[in-house]
Amino acid sequence: MMAGRNEDDGDSSVITETKPKTKRPPLYKVMLLNDDYTPMEFVVLVLERFFGLNHAQAFEIMLTVHKKGLAVVGVFSHEIAETKVAQVMDFARRHQHPLQCTMEKED
Ligand code: TYC
């Protein structure tokens, strides 16, 4: 390279900011919905079995759903969230309880 002959003379600069875009996969909230028929103890069992909560945590979240109508019980990748929803819905259906579990993309 010859001295003093750089192509960029600095007169007009084009700044192309490239953000370090590290794309993380979107996360999904898994929610339980309240209903009038599913027994409280069944919901507690679901939370212990499929979401790894201890009895006290499970009871607390069950009560939140009971009082508020719904609650987020966990946040997962799309595939894991789908599996959790399917497991809960299948378990509830097999026990003939109307318990509903849904997922929603996190903002
Ligand atoms: N509301 C139910 C009852 O009184 C209990 C319940 C809690 C049901 C949470 C569903 O997601 C639920 N037996």
Image (spheres, helix red, strand yellow):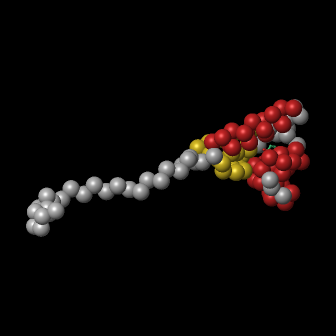
Of 7 and 52, nearer the camera is: 7
Residue at the spot x=87%, y=48% of the render?
A: 45
The percent position of residue 5, horizontal first and vertical second, equals 10, 63
* Residue 16 appears in the figure: yes
Say which quarter of the image contains residue 18: bottom left
The percent position of residue 105, horizontal first and vertical second, equals 58, 44
* Count of all numbered marks drawn on residues in the image: 0
Of 35 and 47, nearer the camera is: 47
Q: Taking the image as four quarters, which one is ligand 1 found in?
A: top right
Left or right relative to 84: residue 16: left
Of 100 and 34, nearer the camera is: 100
* Residue 18 position (above or below residue 32): below
Residue at the spot x=13%, y=58% of the render?
A: 7
Work out which residue is located at the far bottom of the displayed protein and give it.
3
* Residue 68 appears in the figure: no
Of the 4 image quadrants, the one containing the N terminus is: bottom left
Of 83 and 103, nearer the camera is: 83
* Residue 3 position (above or below residue 26): below
Left or right relative to 51: residue 81: left
* Residue 33 position (above or below residue 6): above
Left or right relative to 71: residue 46: right
Residue at the spot x=12%, y=67% of the render?
A: 3
Say which quarter of the image contains residue 20: bottom left
Residue at the spot x=70%, y=51% of the render?
A: 74
